[in-house]
Structure formats: C-alpha cells, structure tokens
Image: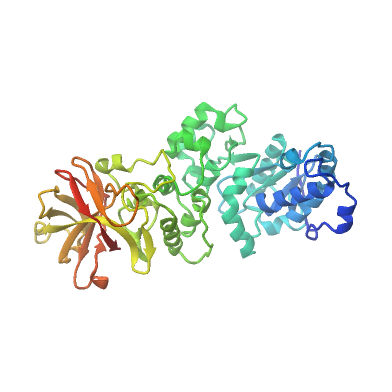
Amino acid sequence: MALHWQTTLTRPSVEFDAEDESSCEEVDQDGAPTEADIMAVTAELVFNEMPSHLIYISDDYETTLIDRETLVDLFRPELISVCKDLVSKDKLFDVVRQKLRYAALSHRWLSVGEPTFQEMSVERNHQSTRPGLIKLRNFCQKAREYGCRLAWSDTCCIDKKSSAELDEAIRAMFKWYRNAEICIVFLADSSSISDFSEEVWFQRGWTLQELLAPPRIKFYGRHWDKLSHSRNDKEDHSMLEALSHVTGISRQNLLYFSPGLVDVREKMIWASKRRTTRVEDIAYSLIGILNISLNVAYGEGERAFRRLMEAIIQACREWQILAWAGPHSPFQASVPRSPLAYCAFDEASTSILLPNRYITDRPSKLGDPFFTMTKRGLELEVILVEMMLQQPAPRRPGGTQKKTQTIRLISDSADFFDVTAQCDITFLPFSQWAVAIVNYRAHDSGKRGGVGKLKPANDYLCFILGSSIHSAHGGWQKVETQKIVTIRTMREVYQRVTTVWL
C-alpha cells in the first residue's frame, strides 16, 4: 500500500500542571498508576531513550515526521487507557516501552537522492520514484510488519542543520539502535548470504555499531527479500556464521556485545576494516561502541582520532591498547594515526595480544595500569633496557632509495636476546637506543614504582626508543616501526621500572 507523507507536527513542550495532577486519583506508592505517573514515565522514556525525531506510521500507512513532544501528545490517550487498569506501577515502564516500540534502519547511503529532514518536514508529494524515497517507503512497510508504528532513519530523522541535535544523535546513536524493537538492514549489493564478501555495508564505519548494538536484527537484500527464514537474524545459526566470517567478530560479541573500554584493541581491529567518508567519523563512529564521551567538531580532521585515543588512555587500564605500529598521529607521537595501526602484528606477537576474556575489578598485574596522558606526552612505567645499534649494511651505490630499513639492537646484558625491527631511516641518527618493555609482571600490590619481573621464553611487547641532544627534555622518543616489536629474555629478570614520557 502506498505511503503518504505529511507535514511535521510540532507541539509545545509536555508539561503537567497542578490541575492535571489534582484530577488523578491519589494512591499509595505501590498502588495502580495515576495519569501523572503514566505521563511522567512516558516523558522519561521518550526524552532520554528514544530518538529526537521519528516517523509515525498510521494504520492506513500515512506517515508523519514527529518530534518528541508530539510523540508524547499523540500517544497520551492510548497510554492512559492501557495503563490505568494496571494494578501496580511495577510494569508501567515495560508497558509504555512496548507501546512506543520503533524500528531503526541500517543501510548504505546513496551518493545522491536520500530524503532529508527538511524534505520530510514540509508538505509535498513524496510518491516519487527516487531511490532514496523508495527505500524509505519499503523500510516503513517492513517496520509495520514487525508491529512498529514508529520508525527511525538517519537520513531524514536528524536535523543536521542543528549542531545540538546532530551532536546528540552521534553520541546517542548506539543507544537508539540498541533500544529499537528491530533493526532492519538493507543490503543494496546482496541477493543472498554468499554475497556478503562483496557487500559494501560491511565496509562502512558507521554500520559497525549498527551491527553490534541491536539485540534483534533483520537483513534484506537488494530487492527487499529476506536473507533468512528467521524473524531475528541474530537467532539464525547460518546467518551468525556468515556475519562472523565476513566481519571477524565472534558469535559471542555479535549476540551479547557490551559497549565499553574492555578489549579496546580488538574493537579497533574491527574498525580498521571499515572506511568513512569524513575522516572525523573514524573516531565519532566508535563513541558508542567504546561508551566514551567525545565532543563532535566536524572540520577538526585527524585531531578527532587523536582526541578519542587520549580519552581512551585516560580511562582504560589495558596495556594492549599500546600495542600498535606504523604511522603515529600528526598531533601526538604516542597515539596511532588510525585503527589500522592495530593490525600491524605478526605471528610472534599474536599470542600475547589475545583479548581479555576475564575481567576483574583490580588493575591488571601486567605492566603499568596507571599510564596516562600528560603535557609531556604518554606517561608510562616500563622496564627500560639500553641497547646498542648494530650498524646496518651500507646501501649499494645507485640502489633504490628506501624509506625503511631493518635495524638490530644488541643489549650489553647477557639477559636479553637481540631485537630486530623495520623502521623509518630518519630515526637512525639517534645517539642512544633502548627498548621499553610494556607487559612485564608488576608488583602484586598494583602500586606504581617497584620491580618488574620477566620470565624466560616469553614474548614481551616493547617499544624501540631513541634519544639525542635534540630530543625534547633530553628524553626518549618512540621509534616508528612497521610491525609491533617483541623481546625475549634468556633467564628470569627482576628490574626496577622506569617512568618514560613518549
């Protein structure tokens, strides 16, 4: 059935005056809800847990873009009628949420032709054959099939001319997808699961959270055909297997993903496989996944990812977030330029970089859990081992000029094996060299300072450091390497930790 678009409705902010309250029957705290109770719970849900604008789909499939105030006013009679017969307030929130359930659309934006907030906010004929509007009409039809009279699409339900609304949407989007009754995914390049390897939706940055957040999700192909027989594709074994294969995300995380600063490095690896149109969105698309607060400031470019990493470092205690290699941020040498830096590992470092599966309230006993960002850079306690640079072989005359070169560092101590790494040749003029071992066994008390322990035959994450008379504060600089560097000891080592600023 065709959908008819109407003008956006706007109403004054929802208020409950004394006259409304006095008309409600007084009951005790555990009794049946009053009208004031019902509307207070409704306002709490709508203004804190739901998107700022939604598409309302009527029973005859007419659709209207509405704001939060209008939503509360529109559903008020129905909610009062349904909730007034409840014998207790205990179920009130669940009943209201069920009545206000909405569907969320996940898709790949078209280069042109997507409906905008401004278009949906004025009265005009939307029975267009424009691909973006056809997609939106099909989405609304699927939403009604799932019993949702409300629908949300990021193309037309965000007023992007309002910086405040855009900022809220980016910060709250993970929550909005998680709270949706169903997330409907439109895969424009797929006709079946076998097409997933070529599907662009799996290569976009924002769709990562749209995959992880919803507890219920349904995939549709290019002709809006279902790609499985399940009502919820997160309950379909074949679909989960295909999703895990194409994304590299475990079934456990696909089903029970919890946002936060746990296994951050693993989440960065997921993100490294995706691209965004705006460079800032590399950082902004991870805000919800990491459950971190970050101001949105389009135009800041690569500073956005630097700010994200600094916020992570200030709150995270996992030493694995320091395990990256390759180009650093142009604004801070101690943080990577992008999530791709977390993929620069080889077989030797794989075993020590497995994600944490058991979380405790105590700081990890490996490395310094209190590393922090300061004005001098990343402050970190390490086991510092001074090394000597074995002079690299001279380049042949007329040979191809290379930007990187393999170097070998040799320790004065008989306790450590040599370290080799591929690094930028611009670092070779350093007069002093060292390695900083990160994941040593720390003192049981978890306090700063003290002695770190290393066991023989174990691989340890380390940074290669260089220093010269030109180094800031006469300190150490992290040397850019192409791969994550590890070191081994020949025997058990106990050594006092050293604070470095990188």
Residue 391 location, x and y as percent?
10, 59
Answer whether residue 51 is visible to the viewer in this image: no
Q: Residue at x 46, y 45 (%)?
A: 203
Quarter of the image that includes the N terminus: top right
State the residue in front, 490 or 46: 490
Q: With 58 as the anchor, is 109 left or right in this view?
A: left
Q: With 186 as the anchor, is 357 left or right in this view?
A: left
Q: Residue at x 19, y 58 (%)?
A: 434
Quarter of the image that includes the C terminus: bottom left
Image quadrant where residue 395 sits:
bottom left
Answer whether residue 91 is visible to the viewer in this image: yes
State the residue in front, 472 or 369: 369
State the residue in front, 403 or 13: 13
Is 82 located above or below residue 328 in the figure?
Answer: above
Is 452 located above or below residue 238 in the figure?
Answer: below
Residue 312 location, x and y as percent?
43, 56
Residue 86 location, x and y as percent?
81, 37
Number of marks in the rendered image: 0
Colour treatment of the image:
rainbow
State the residue in front, 79 or 92: 92
Q: Residue at x 60, y 45 (%)?
A: 177
Query: Which residue ends up furthest to the front in the rendered image?
Result: 445
Q: With 374 as the anchor, is 27 left or right in this view?
A: right
